[in-house]
């Protein structure tokens, strides 16, 4: 059974969708019909979000997710899921790890259906932040919250 939840974060509403056992979508939006929302189903995840948005080190890599994507994107997402709180990786570093180009990594990440759990905001350009499907300002705020914004500056000045 498909379940929907809405979490109100300091950076805006987050909608989560699960198929009972796995998260299939997580996005910064209020995009679930209110009558379908069952936040009790996401109680544990939302407690983690509380910690995360208070700036406490929080990892999400143990939360089961289900992706309906091609094998290339799956490789990129799996690699990006390894990037820890407070760390960043460049598009080039991710590309080298999966055997492709930085541009291809950027395109794959622009299709990421499970934000935060697949932390594509932690992938940055060698010259600065790079892009983000929900806007560079949100990416900057997420990196700031995680204490890794200064690392972006050090990458860009190399």
Image (cartoon, grey):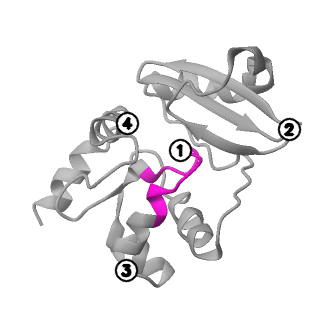
Q: Depth check: 153 or 19 in front?
A: 19
From what the image shows, is residue 71 above or below residue 157? below
Which of the two labelled residues, at mark 4 and mark 1, occupies the earlier sequence position? 1
Pointer 1: residues within 10 angstroms few (<14), some, or many (20+)?
some
Instruction: Give the number of the mark in front: 4 or 1.
Output: 1
Residue bearing mark 3? 101
Q: Secondary structure at mark 1?
A: loop
Image disc number at residue 60: none
Q: Which region is colored magenta?
A: 108-120
- Main secondary structure along the magenta-highlighted residues: loop
Dividing the picture into quadrants, the one containing residue 90 is bottom left
Residue bearing mark 2: 20
- The residue pinned by badge 1 equals 115
Q: Position of residue 35 (x, y in %)?
A: 75, 14
Q: Is the C-beta separation of discs 3 and 2 under 8 Å?
A: no
10 Å neighbourhood of mark 2: few (<14), some, or many (≥20)?
Answer: few
């Amino acid at each position: 059974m498909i379940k929907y939840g809405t979490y109100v974060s300091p950076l805006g509403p987050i909608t989560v969708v699960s198929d009972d056992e796995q998260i299939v979508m997580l996005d910064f939006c209020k995009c679930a019909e209110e009558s379908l929302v069952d936040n009790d189903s996401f109680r544990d995840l939302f407690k983690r979000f509380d910690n995360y948005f208070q700036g406490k080190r929080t990892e999400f890599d143990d939360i089961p997710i289900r992706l309906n994507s091609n094998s290339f994107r799956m490789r990129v997402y799996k690699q990006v899921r390894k990037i820890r709180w407070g760390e960043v990786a460049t598009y080039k570093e991710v590309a080298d790890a999966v055997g492709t180009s930085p541009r291809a990594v950027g395109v794959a990440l622009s299709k990421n259906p499970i934000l935060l759990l697949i932390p594509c905001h932690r992938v940055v350009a060698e010259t600065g932040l790079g892009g983000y499907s929900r806007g560079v300002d949100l990416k900057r705020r997420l990196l700031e919250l995680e204490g890794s914004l200064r690392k972006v500056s050090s990458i860009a000045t190399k």
